[in-house]
Amino acid sequence: MSGINEDSVRGGNIIKDIGTDDDWQPTEIESLCMNCYKNGTTRLLLTRIPFFKEIIVSSFNCDHCHWSNTEIQSAGEIQDQGVCYTMKIKTKQDLNREVVKADSATSRIPELDFEIPPFTQKGSLSTIEGLLDRAVAGLEQDQPARRKTDPDVAARIDEFIQKLQKLKDVEEEFTLVIEDPSGNSFVENPLAPLKDEALTVTKFKRTIEQDKQLDDINAMRNEVLVFDTNCPECNRSAKTNMKLVNIPHFKEVIIMATNCDNCGHRTNEVKSGGATEEQGTKITLHVTDVSDMTRDVLKSETCAVLIPELEFELGMAALGGKFTTLEGLLKDIKDLIVDKNPFISGDSGVTETIQKLKEFGGKIEKVIAGEVDVHIILDDIAGNSYLQNVYAPEPDPEMTIEKYTRTFEQNEDLGLNDMKTEGYEQDN
């Protein structure tokens, strides 16, 4: 995580064996809540599990909106071989065994013909009972909507949830299989270093498909993809570079940049790596110093830009998606409105209009130079824009982030009103 400093971190030694020190406290970091955009607390625990390896446990909790999230990551590399744990659960005591489930692992309960595919859940440090609870929570998540759109399917899922819940009574023996091609999952053996007759651990060589899946995930986060396209200016063949980038305290975005060797045209475009958020987001920055011009800005294609002091508003369709600095965004606005405006030159230019546009360009230059204090507002109805908090993980005194419920018209602009995600197969 970025933004960690000596004042914001409290803790002891970096890695200790889990459960060996009652006084050992996790490292605590103040960090931004992605649900309400207020500050919450992330707790990091770098721990060594006996007879296994080091892992990083992270847990986030927001006291404002009570949103929470827990996940684990391996502190090591992908192992040479995959691993498969087969556990026979015979008593309720077996449900208390600790389990490290990497996000690349597949979980199965053969008796119920139930499987959780890899990469559908984030990694977790839990117990066998916790895994069952997490599976139930995942199935229950969309049940309220499903009961309205497809009651028959909802009833069958409710019936299956009851079967999962009943497993916790351990009235009959059942089997839990965790198969992880990365080799970074683990099921506790309480008898270690002695053999556990109820637990079978086997190593296996990854298939070509499994190797490719693990490699693709790592490569996608580091590789710049290049493909042929046409230059939007001269229509000659050009190269477009594309990369998946993780923005700290925000989310993953896709950056695309086109460079034309023929006419020299350069452009960049940004697409959100995630879905449309449930609410829109309005980010307001009070620009008080020229140093604010260096802040990173992600303006999505659904974001409008406003500067109240200049009585200026740029619609969300203009400029498209961009990942730049605040100075770069203001220069792009000046280019669009003034320098590259076809109506500012030639016979079509009206003297009064030309003068107003030039005055506006001069005001933008003064804002860039730090000579004028203004408020810059990014209003994104899809919630996919971002403005860097240079004080992160501390709150930014000059910036406010407001989430709001979209109007019917705004949902119409995003095409959400007619979007059907439940029971769509019935229309075919």
Image (cartoon, rainbow, N blue to C red):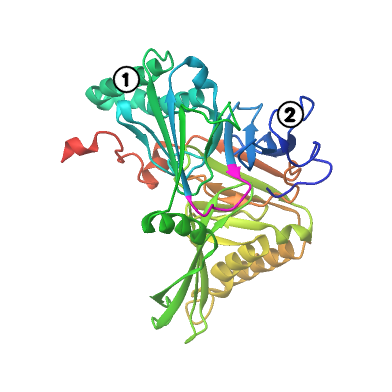
Report, in whole angstroms, how far the alpha carbon at label 1 lies from the one at label 2.
41 Å
Give the secondary structure at mark 2.
loop
Which disc number belongs to residue 112? none
Q: Amino acid at mark 1?
A: Asp
Q: Residue at x 40, y 76 (%)?
A: 228
Residue 114 shown left or right of residue 71 in the figure: left
Residue 158: give its label. 1
Q: Which residue is mark 2?
A: 20
Q: Nearer the viewer, mark 1 or mark 2?
A: 2
Q: Position of residue 165 (x, y in %)?
A: 40, 17
Label 2 Cα neighbours within 10 Å, binned few <14 / some 14-19 / many ≥20:
few
Instruction: Inspect the image, locate mark 2, and give the three-letter code of the amino acid beneath it.
Output: Thr
Kindly report the secondary structure that dominates the magenta region of the rendered protein.
Answer: loop
The residue segment tinted magenta is: 73-81
Do tag 1 and tag 2 residues touch (Cβ < 8 Å)?
no
Q: Position of residue 273 (x, y in %)?
A: 48, 52
Q: Residue at x 49, y 85 (%)?
A: 261
Which is nearer the eye, 372 or 62? 62
Taking the image as drawn, is residue 134 in sight?
yes
In the rendered view, tell whether residue 195 sits above or below residue 344.
Answer: above
Task: Tell which residue pokes out farthest to the front in this image.
Answer: 194
- Reply yes or no: does residue 75 show up in magenta: yes
Q: Secondary structure at mark 1?
A: helix
* Quadrant location of the C terminus in the rendered image: top left
Please tell me in which quadrant of the rendered image residue 32 appears.
top right
Query: Observer-nearest residue: 341 or 148?
Result: 148
Q: Which residue sits at x=58%, y=64%?
A: 333
Q: Quadrant of residue 362?
A: bottom right
| Residue closer to the observer: 79 or 278 | 79
